[in-house]
Image (tube, rainbow, N blue to C red):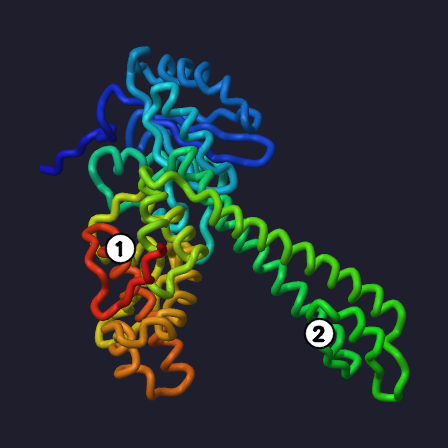
Amino acid sequence: MTMTRDRESTAPMGCLLMAFELGQRSWKLGFSAGIGQRPRVRQIPAGAVGVIGNEIVRAKMRLGLPGEAAVISCYEAGRDGFWLHRYLVAHGITNHVVDSSSIEVNRRARRAKTDRLDLGGLLNLLARYVMGDRRVWRVVRVPTVTDEDARQLPRTWETLTEDRTRLSNRMKGLLTTQGVQIPIDKNFLEHLHAARLWDGTPVPTGLQERLAQDWTQLGQVERQLRERKARARRRPPEAATPTGHAIAQLQTLRAIGVTGAWVLATEIFGWRQIENRRQLGGLVGLVPAPYQSGETAYDQGITRAGNTHVRRVMVQLAWVWLQYQPDSALSQWYQQRFGGGGKRLRRIGIVALARKLLIALWRYLETGAVPDGARLKPMEV
């Protein structure tokens, strides 16, 4: 005899689950009391956090939950950042900010997608997560307001550096269309006026005006970049704070400058609790992504699923490390395995070196153990 059971919720009893679908003009809120339950969906204007409390009260009444029932919510990390998380936590709601790329999805080529289905899926995953299934997604560690604000300066450097590269490349490209090559330096305008095309005529007036405008913008970007880096040297974070301590300690190593120390400290080392080296590599996206199915097995390269700011800086620091720390064990390892290869092999090797260097810097901050063979900067008198 076959026994059947009615569908029932396996989520913790007496708990209201809430999921957000955050849009630019409106938000959708989904409520349920467990897995498999049709969600109660409500729409509110974007940013209208004052309405959330009333919707929670109505949802508890509709779902038959007591007024004092705990509320657990979630939303995907994205454009709205972490301010909503801080608001919810301040009002007694347990909230989880979820990495959207880690959420389980249906792999069918074409599947129905609506806000109700998305909210229902999030609520079911939230229920599984609350019950202890940590594989359904990855929860983002939310920084404090101070830690988040400390990241603005190095990210401003990154933006200004990208603007500088973009302007410089555009100027070189415009000159190349006319067969002209002149240095882009402080005397650029003089070189431009003196430049001649293939037939001896000067550079056309319209192109000169455009290049002069780009050169002016390039000068402004260069000036802003110098000012902000000088500000970081004059006013580093307090050494008593974890971020300030990490910035100061990293700069005691040769090859680690102001930019690298600020990025590493403000993005990861200053406020994250790192348990092991694999977690650190996964955080930055420098761990391998193997593919194995049956007898087929190959390496897909690194995951690139982590912090892009740190990953970019670590690859740059790896090249600089080879130059300023040639006697270190890491540099010798790289030279033995990749130094004699072609360009592609050396590029692959530099990523491996970046991962090893990142782990060595983490250990240096945690235990004070200087990487093998590495040299410290001379003490300032």
Count residues near mark 2 (Cα–Cα under 10 Å), then give few for <14, some for 14-19, many for 20+: some
Residue identified by numbered label 2:
173
Secondary structure beneath dot 1 equals helix
Quadrant in which residue 208 is drawn: bottom right
Q: In the rendered image, which quarter contains the N terminus?
A: top left
Expressed as whole percent of the image width and height from the top left, the position of residue 34 reads: 29, 29
Q: Residue at x 42, y 29 (%)?
A: 30
Residue identified by numbered label 1:
362
Expressed as whole percent of the image width and height from the top left, the position of residue 39 reads: 39, 28
State whether residue 255 is above or below residue 136.
Answer: below
Outermost residue toward the front? 381
- Specify whether 295 is left or right of 33: left
Q: Residue at x 50, y 30 (%)?
A: 28
Quadrant in which residue 290 is drawn: bottom left
Tell me the amino acid under the disc marked 2.
Gly
Q: Residue at x 31, y 35 (%)?
A: 126
Tell me the amino acid under the disc marked 1.
Trp
- Specify whether 184 is left or right of 116: right
